[in-house]
């Protein structure tokens, strides 16, 4: 979910950058550590970074919100499962930065907020959804499905929360505003997109398992073949 440039007041610009920066820093540390252990890790990060970039490159304007934000698939559920949530935050941050600089999609002042919703909430919710589904001994497809779907839902929820905070200084109700914005997302394209992305992530994991199961094994996603 991309909040449009210029939407966030200056105090929220710094707030969301302050919240997001430590996660990006930890993610960079994880990448440096893991690439020393496995030379193939960095190319995998690059490949998934490209996938997240493409996934989130097709903005669908949310007309009911007067151009304040756009909706689209995210891809962070998939990257969080394969790379871990902190590295997935870095992947999302790079994709969002490139889109803001070259595609006028999102913005530099809203980058921290977009990293929070799509990178942090999207990655961690998708990762934990996958782990919970695994503990419930669900098939790999359904583990991936819930990772992709829950990741999208929390991303939309994060954007709704960020936009909901904007009404506080105007005497509005945060909970009412955030709830209405989230409902608009679900009643438009996002209700369908979250299901579609869940299916895509599920099929991707099954495809990798059938063709190159060693990748999932080396990443610790599965315990044995």
Image (cartoon, helix red, strand yellow):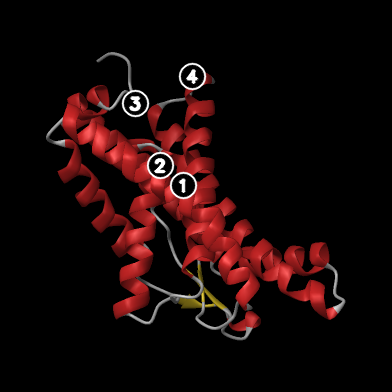
Tell me whether the residue at label 3 lies in contact with that at label 1, contact meaning CB atoms closer than 8 angstroms.
Answer: no
Note whether 62 is above or below 89 in the view shown.
Answer: below
Tell me the number on the disc at residue 138: none
215 and 31: which is toward the camera? 31
**2 and 3 marks in contact (CB < 8 Å):** no
- Which residue is at the front of the view, 43 or 202? 43
Residue at image position (50%, 81%) is 5
The residue wearing badge 2 is 26
N-terminal label among 4 and 1: 1
Quadrant housing residue 95: bottom left
Q: Residue furthest bottom?
A: 66
Q: Residues within 10 Å of mark 1 (few under 14, many from 20)?
A: many
- Mark 4 sits on what residue? 137
Q: Find the distance from the CA under tag 2 to the CA under tag 4.
A: 30 Å
Alpha-carbon distance for marks 4 and 1? Answer: 30 Å
Residue 56: x %, y % from top left: 38, 64
Q: CA distance from mark 3 to mark 1?
A: 22 Å
Q: Secondary structure at mark 4?
A: loop
Mark in the foreground, 2 or 3: 2
The residue tagged 3 is 221
How far separated are the C-alphas under marks 1 and 2? 5 Å
Residue under the image location 23 percent in, 24 percent down: 218
Q: Which residue is mark 1?
A: 23
């Amino acid at each position: 979910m991309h909040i449009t440039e210029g939407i966030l007041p200056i105090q929220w610009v710094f707030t969301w950058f302050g919240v997001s920066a430590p996660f990006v820093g930890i993610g960079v540390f994880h990448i440096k550590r893991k690439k020393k252990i496995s030379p193939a890790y960095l190319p995998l990060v690059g490949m998934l970074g490209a996938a997240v970039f493409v996934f989130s490159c097709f903005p669908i304007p949310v007309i009911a919100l007067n151009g304040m934000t756009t909706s689209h698939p995210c891809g962070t559920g998939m990257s969080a499962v394969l790379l871990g949530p902190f590295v997935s935050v870095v992947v999302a941050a790079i994709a969002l930065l490139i889109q803001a600089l070259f595609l006028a999609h999102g913005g530099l002042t809203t980058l921290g907020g977009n990293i929070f919703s799509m990178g942090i909430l999207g990655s961690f919710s998708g990762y934990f959804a996958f782990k919970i589904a695994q503990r419930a001994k669900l098939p790999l497809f359904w583990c991936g499905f819930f990772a992709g779907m829950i990741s999208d839902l929390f991303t939309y929820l994060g954007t709704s929360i960020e936009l909901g905070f904007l009404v506080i200084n105007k005497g509005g109700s945060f909970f009412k505003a955030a709830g209405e914005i989230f409902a608009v997302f679900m009643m438009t394209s996002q209700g369908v997109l979250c299901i579609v992305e869940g299916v895509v992530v599920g099929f991707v994991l099954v495809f990798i398992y059938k063709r190159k199961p060693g990748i999932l094994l080396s990443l610790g996603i599965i315990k044995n073949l």
